[in-house]
Image (cartoon, rainbow, N blue to C red):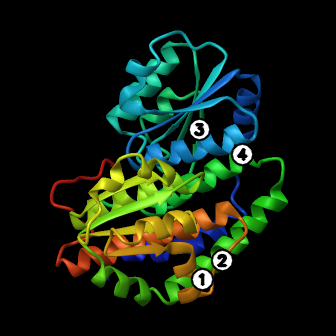
Amino acid sequence: MHLMLEEIESEPAIIENYKSKEFEGLDDILRSLERSTMAYTIGNGTSYHAALYSSILLNRKGRNCLPVISSETENWLNTNKPKSSSIVFSQSGNSVDALNAAEELKRMGSMIIGVTNNRNSKLGKIANLMLYTDVGSEQSVVATKSHLAQLMVALKISIHENNGEFQKILEEAKRNAEAIIGRKSAIQELADSTTANTVFLGSGLLYPIALESSLKLMEASNSISYAFSVRDFLHGPRQLLDRNWSVFMLSTDRKIFQELDPYAKRVVDLNEFLEEEFGVNSESEVVRSIQLLLFGQLMSYYTSLSRNLNPDRPSKLTKVVE
């Protein structure tokens, strides 16, 4: 079995562990956010998708929050930032871009909050406060379980005052993840029949999941893939569509589904697909985001296999984790 698949299959257990996880330092982090007039969430690649996810949750809770690509921090935020907090997401805690962003924001006067899977990281030496995802070493180059854990941390920060809601979300997410993994061959069948070119469409919390699903597909299978917010795709990019493209809709919009269907080889309503194939559905947007993340990871894995590639070792990528 490939390491990537092993790590995806470990995700229900990770969700279960998060139900009882001790979030050391969380109270200090919450106080820092309370005192701040502005928050920034920072990351690159997969970690930027976690930063974007976190910013949506925080903004919905009434906090002013801006997601920033870590490598663009100096270009976007080249002013003093007193009374601000910056949550820096980095799976390894040793990414050069994340470290540079943390140092620059700290120089600007922002309180640095690091989120990483590595308790001995360089980020831990720069940050004022830390939260650790604690999901164990991730061996596959393509990040899966560590990203899920980043989303768990982002969720905990945003609904810290309601542990009952946190527990309820995680229980449903775990149950649905187990159902998907139990019949993952249905995703393999879809991957085997999908076109080489794909588009993922999402809105709200499902937009960063669309971005992550597209990135995973590019990383693991050398696919041409894009992600857009649902309605933004109508403003020009749909011109790309022809019979060589498949569209995966994370956010259900029947009108747009019907509008795009004549142009692509296949348009898939993923919430409908998950309900029909696995019997999973949820009224919770957070739960839907987690089960759709799992779909995107498995889709990427099986697409890689269908192209006779090694999903654990993409030819042009390396892992930062030490």
Indicate which label's residue lies in the foreground, 1 or 3.
1
Marks 2 and 1 close (CB-CB < 8 Å): yes
Residue under label 1, please give it.
Answer: 275
Please say whether residue 34 is visible from this viewpoint. Answer: yes
Which of marks 3 and 1 precedes in the sequence? 3
Amino acid identity at mark 4: Ser
C-alpha span from label 2 to label 1: 6 Å
Which of marks 3 and 4 precedes in the sequence? 3
State the image coordinates of residue 215 (x, y, percent, origin top left): 35, 56
C-alpha span from label 1 to label 3: 38 Å
Numbered disc total: 4
Relative horizontal placement of residue 34, taking residue 5 as reference (left or right): right
Which of marks 1 and 4 precedes in the sequence? 4
Could you tell me which residue is drawn at 38 percent across and 19 percent down?
Answer: 75
Residue under label 3, please give it.
Answer: 130
Amino acid identity at mark 1: Glu
Secondary structure at badge 2 equals loop
Above or below residue 200? Residue 262 is below
Relative horizontal placement of residue 140, taking residue 274 as reference (left or right): left
